[in-house]
Amino acid sequence: MSKDQSQSSPPPAMDRFAPLSDPRQVAMLALRDLFQVPGLGLFFSMVGFSAIAREAGFGLKEALATSALVWGMPGQVAMASLYLAGASAAVIFMAVALANMRMMLMVVSTVDLIGFRRHGTALIKQIFLMHFLAITTWIQLSVVRGKVADRAMVIYFMAFALPLFVIGMTGTVLGFYLVDIVPPLLLKSIVFTTPLYILMMVAKIRIQLFRYAGVVGGALAPLLYPLIGEWAILTAGIVGGTLVMLPRLNTARQVRRKMHRKKRHNQS
């Protein structure tokens, strides 16, 4: 090949499998992902919650405030159920706080995943944005990891989580008025749309360890329910995750021991 030909040859094509980093492309990907099963699942779940809230005696303002401020289905259902039962404000507050405590670990992992520190995001802005974190968003971030460049994950998060919040508020409003024309039992049953979606997304997660944890926990929950009742889900999650992690922890311990022995041997 001559020198002129080599200089005029076109540059090599970009890797089509490279992670997305262009802000516009990342935002479009987030919106495309949102307006499929994730958005529909959360929308119908909020419709179901609104039916529960209205049955508990909530007005539209109270239902919207609960969805907006609690923004977690277990906490929202607990609040409506305890209000209907006539529980005190202190009891309701503690129940909602405990129901949403699972979000703590999700927030910590999400802050690291989307890289607030890399972007120099102010703490107050981090707190504000993390309020819009839902388990749907958390699962979706795990699914797209590797498809989106690390520096663009925060863009994906905002383009997915903020419209999802709007979808949730819309579902709350719609569900409040659908009670008049649709059987309430049917509306309340669709609260389980999001858990079913989460189960499907766990099956799609690339890291097999997470799949195994979901399968083991899901199998244990119905077995434990006759014995410990409402604690079955929490216990199954902890036991399932622990059982799956034990072999990995044991392997890591063995590796550390080998490295330590090798280090001592080299020193001697």
Image (cartoon, rainbow, N blue to C red):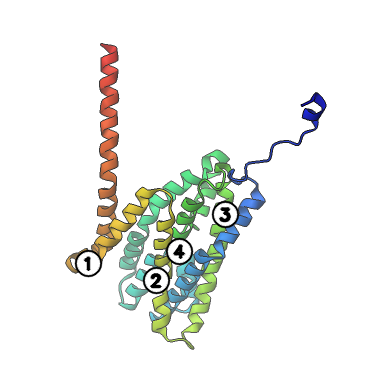
User: Cα distance, mark 3 to mark 4?
Assistant: 16 Å
Q: Does the image show residue 52? A: no
Residue tagged 2? 192
Amino acid bearing label 3: Met
Marks 1 and 3, how far apart at CA: 38 Å
Q: Quadrant of the N terminus?
A: top right
Q: Residue at x 32, y 73 (%)?
A: 82
Q: Is residue 117 above or below residue 225?
A: above
Q: Residues within 10 Å of mark 1 (few under 14, many from 20)?
A: some
Asked whether, in this view, residue 135 is left or right of residue 218, the answer is right
The answer to whether mark 4 and mark 1 are in CB contact below 8 A is no
Residue at mark 4 to residue at mark 1: CA–CA distance: 26 Å
Residue 186: where, in percent of width, then height? 41, 82
Badge 4 element:
loop
Label 4 amino acid? Trp
116 shown above or below 188: above
